[in-house]
Amino acid sequence: MANTLVVGMQWGDEGKGKKIDQESEKHDVIVRYQGGGNAGHTVVIEDKKYALHLIPSGILRADKLNIIGHNVVIDPEEFAKEVEGLRSRGVEVSSRNLLVSHRAHMTLLYHKRLDVAREAFKRKKGKQIGTTGRGIGSTYVDKYNREGIRVFKLNNMDELAKKVEENLEITNFLLEHYSDKPLSLDEVMTGLIKNRELLLDFSHNDIGRVILERDGKVLGESAQGTLLDVDEGTYPFVTPSNPTIGGFYTGTGVYINFKKVHGILKAYTTRVGEGPFPTELEDETGERLRQRGHEFGTTTGRPRRCGWQDLAIARYAIRVNGINEISLTKLDVLDAEKSIKVCVGYNINGQKADYFPAEQMENCEPIYESLKGWEQDISGIRSWQDLPKNAKSYVSFIEQFLDVPVKQIGVGARRDQTIDRA
Ligand code: IMP
């Protein structure tokens, strides 16, 4: 067994949930290290669908330890709902199998209100990010402004209330500026008081030690994807955390070596929210991918923008994360395509580029290679040999271009709908 990290190679929603679920069987501890309730991992087990937002997917397997690291921002109300939702479906969720770093910051009611009000304000000027409205950005802003409130503060509710009151002075000023109603201390505290005990039950003061004790058996679970990374992604149209490998280290406070860095690459590309997307298809092909791939957000239900595979982006994700193997997901969604395009670089203002630029992404005109489609249902296929020739050529093209092996191919949402390659 070796430590493994699973990371998204696009703008999130690559289908990480399924791989993380499979890998969790082979590891003892599963660590979610960044993001918050903006994420949504869907895991399908025996036709039962579980949508997880904060809790690592390892919770669905018996005898696994799940850890929420301190770069995750936790909304106590959402956390409680998720715990209770899982429990009501017979899944064990206790401090035996789930720990939350007491250093993690909490998303409070005012963070959510600020996120939504600020987006509405910016939308009037056509400048919105298209956030999930879960208060993620405002929680991280408070964290970096050194105004955040961490989980361990729940041990001292008087101090916590004082801090909330202090923060409300600024927050209410902003809310009123954005033409939203101010919040009272009581409104903010109600949810915290209600969920305090539940969250404290899981709170742990040294998750780093727990992880080191299990070095070699650790699975890192990233949320979102490389292109949404606040430093490496399509800033400012990003999420305010580090889904890339670096986020694991700041989110846990320990160094462990990842022998396997497994990148998840969807057979085509999607993104939700605003921002550049060079291979986007705003035609019936894009609509077909959306319908066939059920491309609607797990967290917000928003239709996802769809487009062709972009290998310039994938190559960048490999470099950023040190990815040494890939899962190509949702290949079956391309079953209906006669011809499939793959972006291998860009024309930027008349100049060829084979890299992903930090600026001018909106000016990137994709350079495509066209491959023949296979035009048959592959959802029942379970071995590489049985895949149609053109599907194999598509996978091999990606593999050769990226120079990283495609170890697994997804042909459907269920756990068993995968093709493993040696
Ligand atoms: P935020 O994370 O809610 O601040 O949203 C910032 C951007 O990241 C928006 O474009 C969101 O749609 C996007 N985003 C956040 N979480 C996810 C995710 O889990 N999958 C895909 N996009 C996401």
Image (tube, rainbow, N blue to C red):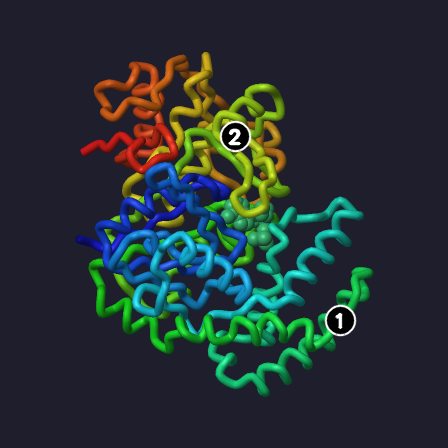
Q: Is residue 62 visible?
A: yes
Determine which quarter of the picture holds residue 347. top right
Query: Which quadrant, please, contains the C terminus?
Result: top left
Q: Determine whether, in the image, residue 202 is placed left or right of residue 65.
A: right
User: First in sequence: mark 2 or mark 1?
Assistant: 1
Badge 1 local density, few (<14 within 10 Å), some, or many (20+)? some
Give the Cα distance between marks 2 and 1. Answer: 45 Å
Residue at mark 2: C-beta within 8 A of ligand 1: no
Q: Determine whether, in the image, residue 230 is placed left or right of residue 109.
A: left
- In-front residue for pair 204/261: 204
- In-front residue for pair 49/234: 49
Mark 2 residue element: strand
Residue drawn at (61%, 60%) of the image: 135
Going by the numbered disc 1, the residue's amino acid type is Asn
Residue drawn at (63%, 73%) of the image: 190
Percent of width and height locating residue 391: 34, 19
Going by the numbered disc 2, the residue's amino acid type is Tyr
Q: Which residue is mark 1?
A: 172
Q: Is residue 235 visible?
A: no
The label on residue 236 is none
Determine which quarter of the picture holds residue 34. bottom left
Q: Which residue is mark 2?
A: 346
Percent of width and height locating residue 384: 24, 24
